[in-house]
Image (spheres, rainbow, N blue to C red):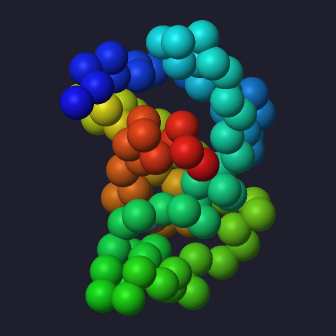
Amino acid sequence: MNDQTIQLKSLEQRDNYTFTIEWSDGQLNDYSLSTLQQHCPCANCTDEQTGKRRAGIKNIENVRAQRIVSVGRYALRVYFTSGCSAGIFSFDMLRNL
Ligand SMILES: [Zn+2]
């Protein structure tokens, strides 16, 4: 087990569609909300049986975040303007996007 878990150091919203995360190891990553929406793991966006994307979310390029909150010390929850608000993005997943 690796107990040097990566933590989120800071999160900065760059514009309506992008934000930057600085990680505890100093790495900087830019994330676009449309990319996150495409990878959203919640049951509204992904069929849990097949793992396939649902087609329900429209206008993915223009999706924005109403807010982004941290979940414990391991994940972010994004409230998308598309109506999806159940997506929990673990830091591991964000680092691998
Ligand atoms: Zn979702």
- The number of discs equals 0
Q: Residue at x 48, y 12 (%)?
A: 24
Image-quadrant location for residue 15: top right
- Residue 6, above or below 63: above
Q: Quadrant of ligand 1?
A: bottom left
Picture residue at 60% right of the left edge, 48% below the top:
97
Please state the horizontal and vertical placement of residue 51, each as a whole percent of the image.
41, 81
**Taking 83 as reference, is 13 above or below it?**
above
Residue 39 seen in the figure: yes
Q: Is residue 77 above or below residue 27?
A: below
Q: Quadrant of residue 8?
A: top left
As rendered, which of 97 and 36 lies closer to the eye?
Answer: 97
Q: Position of residue 14 (x, y in %)?
A: 75, 27
Instruction: Please state the horizontal and vertical placement of residue 4, each as a whole percent of the image.
Output: 33, 17
Across and down, in percent, residue 57 comes to: 58, 77
Q: Which quadrant of the rendered structure holds the N terminus? A: top left
Residue 67 visible in this rendered orientation of the protein: no
Q: Is residue 49 left or right of residue 27?
A: left
83 left or right of 50 in image: right
| Residue lying at 65% horizontally and 50% vertically, measured from the top left | 33
Say which residue appears at 53% left-offset and 12% top-offset.
25
Q: Which sits in the foreground, 69 or 42?
A: 42
